[in-house]
Image: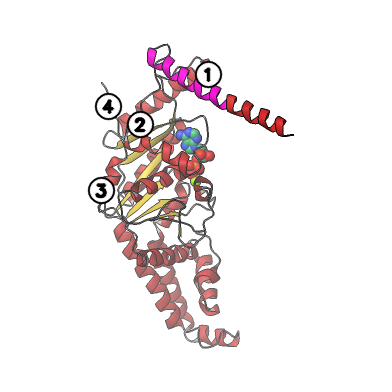
Amino acid sequence: METPEGTLQNILEQESLKWVFVGGKGGVGKTTCSSILSMLLASVRPSVLIISTDPAHNLSDAFQQRFTKIPSLVNGFTNLFAMEVDPKVENDDITNDEGLDSIVSELSNAIPGVDEAMSFAEMLKLVQTMDYSVIVFDTAPTGHTLRLLQFPAALEKGLAKFMSLKNRFGGLLSQASRLLGFGDDFSEDAVLGRLEGMRDVIQQVNKQFKDPDLTTFVCVCIPEFLSLYETERLVQELAKFEIDSHNIIINQVLFEDEAVESKLLKARMKMQQKYIDQFYMLYDDFNITKLPLLPEEVTGVEALRRFSKHFTTPYKPALTKGSVEELQQRVAELRLQLNAAENELDKLKRGKHRA
Ligand SMILES: Nc1ncnc2c1ncn2[C@@H]1O[C@H](COP(=O)(O)OP(=O)(O)O)[C@@H](O)[C@H]1O
Ligand SMILES: [Mg+2]
């Protein structure tokens, strides 16, 4: 029984998609996969933005280019933009009057996460006005991302708390703030209006996140027990939040057919296969894409581009050891190496002559 090999072609073909989340545990390949997805989308969409919300930013590493919280063009592209945002921004980044500032920190003491919700909402509001055809999120490890998706509820609570404070203390709040020198800018109505505006944005975006035509979540994992376990938790949480997910990327796969002699590698392959089988069993209604483990890191646009072929065509294992094709390839590789060495030698000789 052979399961048909999946690819991520379905994401490229779903033209209605506006938000693509890429998530999973740390180190599995979220940044690599989201970067490649954004590059592939850039070839079929008018404009693409990739946003990293992982405090351990590494879009800069993947693309080998510095990014900031303002979208900037990725080198070598005309329609691919990248930005790195820190969900834990300082309050003064999102508010510009002291009254609101203090209220926000009050609120975030009362309900942890409200300040993050505000900056997330602020970011989404901004991004929405920018008119990108599709936005890819390189998310922080699991728990954090899911928390972002619960924010409307948190804000709702924040507002309720604020209202009760207001009712309880009446004008005292604004009197106190005037005494403290915040001035008249700090009116409860202004603060409340601001909070409600924020909640509206989050609610609006969350509605979009729950629409499978607009939003999907790509789960990245590796063929190991912990990752299988985490993926199951993630898939269940996403279902709870009514967020579509129908793609799983199994990264760092060692392929059986490779000409491998190492006992260790063979044992690892066997272990991987066990978990890969379980992935296929558990997620038979998912699109499962397997990506090979490379001997080197996947950094820089060129490496990402080379690796991107595994996103659109199922991985073709290396040639069988001892076959004519394999020997031909080895001869070709050796010839290249020989050429390079000869060139180097030439250069050295010429250098000596000149000296
Ligand atoms: N299939 C792979 N083969 C080899 N190296 C990989 C592969 N996928 C990712 N890497 C490398 O592993 C490291 C972690 O990947 P990254 O995408 O940054 O993970 P995450 O964002 O989930 O923490 C990076 O250095 C990346 O280049
Ligand atoms: Mg990352």
> Marks 4 and 1, how far apart in space?
27 Å
Q: Nearer the viewer, residue 300 or 149?
A: 300
In this rendering, would 112 be left or right of 136? right
**Disc 4 designates what residue?**
3
The local crowd at label 4, few if under 14, some if 14 to 19, many if 20 or more residues have their Cα within 10 Å, is few
Image coordinates for residue 87, horizontal then vertical, percent: 50, 59
In this rendering, would 192 be left or right of 41? right
Image coordinates for residue 97, horizontal then vertical, percent: 53, 79
> Which residue is rendered at x = 44% and y = 52% of the image?
145
Nearer to us: label 2 or label 3 = 3
Q: Nearer the viewer, residue 73 or 352?
A: 352
Residue type highlighted by circle 4: Thr
The local crowd at label 2, few if under 14, some if 14 to 19, many if 20 or more residues have their Cα within 10 Å, is some
> Marks 1 and 2, how far apart in space?
23 Å
For the C terminus, the quadrant is top right
Dot 3: what SS?
loop
Numbered circles on residues, count: 4
Residue 155 seen from this side: yes
**Disc 1 designates what residue?**
264
Q: Which residues are the magenta region?
A: 324-341
> Marks 2 and 4, how far apart in space?
11 Å
Nearer to us: label 3 or label 1 = 3
Q: Say the numbered circle drawn on residue 188.
A: none
Which is more N-terminal, label 1 or label 3? 3
**Disc 2 designates what residue?**
279
Residue type highlighted by circle 3: Gln
Question: Looking at the magenta stretch, what is its main secondary structure?
Answer: helix
